Amino acid sequence: MSGTNTQTKQTEGAEATVPQSIVVEPVRGGNGLKGVMRVPGDKSISHRAIILGSVAAGETVVHGLLEGEDVLRTVAAFRAMGVEITISEKGIYSIHGVGLDGLSEPDHVLDMGNSGTGMRLLTGLLASQSFFSVVTGDDSLRTRPMGRVIQPLTRMGAVILGRDGGRLAPLAIRGRELLPLEHQTGVASAQVKSAILLAGLNTAGVTQVTEPALSRDHTERMLTGFGAVIQRDGLTVTLEGWPDLKGQTIRVPGDISSAAFFLVAGLLCPGSDLLIEGVGINPTRTGLLDLLAEMGAGLTLSNERLEGGEPVADIGVGFAELKGITVPPEVIPRAIDEFPIFFVAAALAQGQTVLAGAGELRHKESDRIRAMALGLNQLGARVEEHGDGVIIQGRPEGLEGGVTVDSLTDHRVAMSLAVAGLRCKNPVTILRTANIATSFPNFVQQLNNIGGMIATS
Ligand code: S3P
């Protein structure tokens, strides 16, 4: 179904199709979405595998790395700091770790593209290196708040300069020896927590981070696997500096944040029967599964296992008549990346859905409250935007569509609106979709493989 103008971006080890815009046809009748599938590797875990593999001693071998643009930026950054990263024919990445003090000064700016995780985690790591570096990103990333990592790192003694009084990238980092810190974060943010922990790796003494609610804990789990002394006590994590990190073999599970689009698509399209194999179900990431269950979804988890310290399962989904809910505030950090697609489920559910206390959504790749309210309302949904949330009156009969909407360059907004398009009466065009390649390069192909009809241009 691809149009003629589809751009193909060739990156080493990955060929990603990058549609500038997409046209979604409704799934008609009871045809549904059917098949057995896998989604690409977890983005959060992939970044961390490259980072920790680079500063460990010896070789780290990564199976199933997400070859999306965000992670490939992190790969490029470590290569620019002298780390040899090779890719076998089977897409297996080998990282020849240089140890905590083995990175070398990059001779150019490190461009993290669209990736908040890449920029924030690297800023933490680089703050305690013995060299100068500059990190930057695309138009979206250069508007996202960096003060939340700069402020605690500065308390450790870091020297980081940025635009807007040190709140916005590009960031210039004069790496130096730091002091350990006991820090209480203002938001439940794995990026802030991880930036501090990564700074603490190369810092003598004990670094401690306490969060208001538990954010994703992949950094802690992976550090344990690499041999660090790291402990959790409730919402507090404690790390001893200068650990002996040893290269590991890492199997990256499928990204639940990518599986989320297919789970909701399966629930919304009558006649669907999907099985998504090998999805990471770390409890700090499964908030969407809880929300969907409360809405009436009958998701099945099978073949549950532990792979490299991370829980994994196959998830089955079929059509369900969903009903609106009030989102319990404690679920928000565990579902933070899934609210765009959750809004789609709510827009097509019976009754009212209420979300409050989710102001963090305004600081993602786009203002996701604004972007989704705009896009869904243009499709015919009833979404009322509030300061830190939304109220949605569902339309289980389906949306109108027949219009052109804008993803505002946000990958998750683009994919969520595409799923909404499956349940519109008329085709929907979505503009500025190229950033789908940051997290899910083959999204369109995979949706078409299971019965979607999406054309790209
Ligand atoms: C991520 C943490 C989350 C999430 C992002 C990935 C990570 O951001 O939204 O997509 O890998 O640590 P915050 O830490 O800002 O909540």
Image: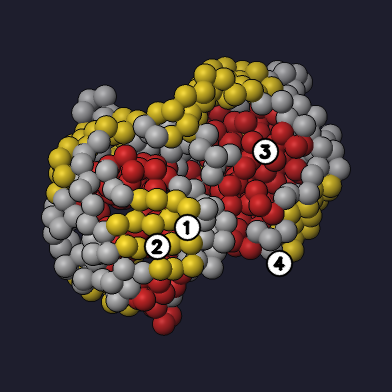
Q: Using the image as rendered, state which of residue 95 and residue 269 is in the foreground.
A: 95
Bin the neighbour count of mark 1 within 10 Å (Cα to Cα): few under 14, some 14-19, many 20 and up: some
Q: Residue furthest front?
A: 233
Q: Amino acid at mark 4?
A: Gly
Name which quarter of the figure residue 150 lies in: bottom left
Residue position marked by numbered label 1 in the rendering: 236
Using the numbered discs, state the Cα–Cα distance from disc 3 to disc 2 in whole angstroms: 30 Å
Percent x, y of residue 192? 44, 61
Q: Residue at x 20, y 48 (%)?
A: 244
**Is any part of residue 413 visible from this angle?**
no
Bin the neighbour count of mark 4 within 10 Å (Cα to Cα): few under 14, some 14-19, many 20 and up: few
Q: Are marks 1 and 3 in contact (CB under 8 Å)?
A: no
Mark with earlier residue (1, 4): 1
Using the numbered discs, state the Cα–Cα distance from disc 1 to disc 4 in whole angstroms: 29 Å
Using the numbered discs, state the Cα–Cα distance from disc 1 to disc 3 in whole angstroms: 24 Å
Q: Residue at x 16, y 67 (%)?
A: 130
Q: Using the image as rendered, state which of residue 391 and residue 230 is in the foreground.
A: 230
Q: Are marks 1 and 2 in contact (CB under 8 Å)?
A: yes
Q: In the image, is residue 448 above or below residue 238?
A: above
Percent x, y of residue 323? 81, 37
Disc number lying in front (1 or 3): 1
Mark with earlier residue (4, 2): 2
Q: Are marks 1 and 4 in contact (CB under 8 Å)?
A: no
Disc number lying in front (3 or 4): 3
